[in-house]
Amino acid sequence: MSQTREYVDKQSLIRLVEKSVPKSKVDVRLFSGDDHFEMCVISPAFVGKSKVAQHQMVYQALGDHMQSRIHALALKTYTPEQWNKE
């Protein structure tokens, strides 16, 4: 019996994060295969939160995709002020 694997596209990931993380700007790139992604998220909702808390917000937004459709995620999060300094 063969297993059918569902793939996720970049736009779906962007919509999930933008819906869950207020006023976010999201960029997603596929960097290896079809389940390894790089993601950059900029949001004022990250102000005052640790990097761990910021990443948890994004992981929560991605939900079940993190266990089933995304094998690896290189995630960078910034407040708008941090992004402007980069």
Image (cartoon, rainbow, N blue to C red):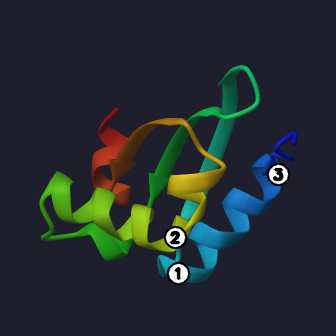
Q: CA distance from mark 1 to mark 3?
A: 22 Å
Graded by Cα atoms within 10 Å as few (under 14), some (14 to 19) or many (20 or more), the crowding at tag 3 reads few
User: How many marks can you see?
Assistant: 3
Q: Does residue 69 appear to the left or right of 24 in the view shown?
A: right
User: Between 61 and 67, which is closer to the camera in this rendering?
Assistant: 67
Instruction: Check whether the beta carbons of the residues at disc 1 and disc 2 lie within 8 A of each other.
Output: no
Residue 12: % across, % down: 78, 62
Q: CA distance from mark 1 to mark 2?
A: 10 Å
In front: mark 1 or mark 3?
3
Q: On the image, which quarter does residue 76 sit in?
A: top left
Q: On the image, which quarter does residue 74 sit in?
A: top left
SS category of the residue bearing label 3: loop
Kind of residue at disc 2? Gly
Please give the name of the residue rendered at 51% of the width and 55% of the height, measured from the top-left corner: 66
The residue wearing badge 3 is 6
The residue wearing badge 1 is 20
Please give the name of the residue rendered at 54% of the width and 65% of the height, measured from the top-left corner: 62
Kind of residue at disc 3? Glu
The residue wearing badge 2 is 63
Q: Earlier in the sequence, mark 1 or mark 2?
A: 1
Q: Quadrant of the C terminus?
A: top left
Q: Quadrant of the N terminus?
A: top right
Q: In this picture, is 69 found above or below 13?
A: above
SS category of the residue bearing label 1: helix
Instruction: Check whether the beta carbons of the residues at disc 1 and disc 3 lie within 8 A of each other.
Output: no
Q: Earlier in the sequence, mark 1 or mark 3?
A: 3
User: Between 56 and 54, which is closer to the camera in this rendering?
Assistant: 56
User: Between 4 and 73, which is closer to the camera in this rendering?
Assistant: 4
